[in-house]
Image (cartoon, rainbow, N blue to C red):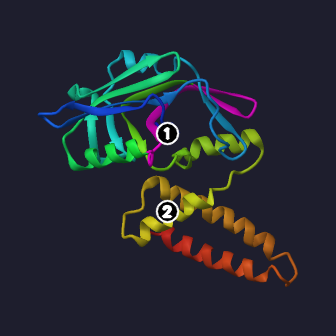
Amino acid sequence: MRTREVRAFPLTDLTIRAADDTAARLHFTGRAIVYDSLSEDMGGWRERIVPGAATRTLAQGPDVRFLINHDPNLLLARTAAGTATLTEDDAGVLVDAEMADVSYARDLAVSLERGDITQMSFGFWVTADGWQGNTHEVFGVDLDGGDVSVVTYPAFAATSAELRSAAARRTGQQPAPEPEAVTRALAEVRAGRVLSAANRQLVADAHEALGALLEAADRTAPGPQAYPHERARHRLRELELLAQL
């Protein structure tokens, strides 16, 4: 079974303009994949997309959606429809798209021009990879059925459980989820949204990390740290309830 991965990069080579004033369409270009650049720390390890990683998949004409925040309901363009094109160069993969004449595309254009949204991300499957020390090197990706997205938040938290486990074995430590990402997962549920698969995994990871924290706390004597430990217990219970959704 293949595991879909999601990664984010700073949004570069961005242009957005009215492509056709009559049809009110918006033209977008931006870089979705950046080659030969180390990711942020992903919990004791980093990742690098090797130049040429997308060459094979792009040669096969993959069907790739252009989305907002990986949400299939916010479809902007699609390679299969000829409204989006992915082009590889030495620096990575560029997206060129004629965005649909829909309200969320116009709203996105405003956010991009203001600089409120500054990142792109892509959903893919790893076809070839390896390790160089604590750096995960991706030599091949499959984009067919995947997506490229403009994103509000980076998506490194969505790294698959399999890759996190491999990284933990490689580095000899178990990465803990980022507090900000857990907070966003909690906000999703409080807002009445369905917990995404990525955030469901995030909650499970947070559960494990907090469990380790509480186990260590139980071995300490009562004192000034008691209140933070009680807060941790409360958060753990909240995460347990969310994980059952």
Label 2 residue SS: helix
Query: Does 13 sit above or below residue 4?
Result: above
| Badge 1 element | strand
Numbered mark located on residue 185 in the image: 2
Our reading of the magenta stretch's main secondary structure is strand
Please state the total of marks drawn on the protein image: 2
Q: Measured along the vertical axis of the image, is residue 23 above or below residue 116?
A: above
Callout 2–callout 1 Cβ contact below 8 Å: no
- Please state, as top left, top right, bottom left or bottom right, where the C terminus lies in the image: bottom left
How far separated are the C-alphas under marks 2 and 1?
18 Å
What x and y, as percent, mark residue 8? 51, 39
Q: Position of residue 31 (x, y in %)?
A: 45, 29
Residue drawn at 73 percent across, 77 percent down: 228
Q: Quadrant of residue 195?
A: bottom left
**Circle 1 residue:** 5
Residues packed near mark 2 inside 10 Å, few (<14), some (14 to 19) or many (20 plus): many
Q: Earlier in the sequence, mark 2 or mark 1?
A: 1
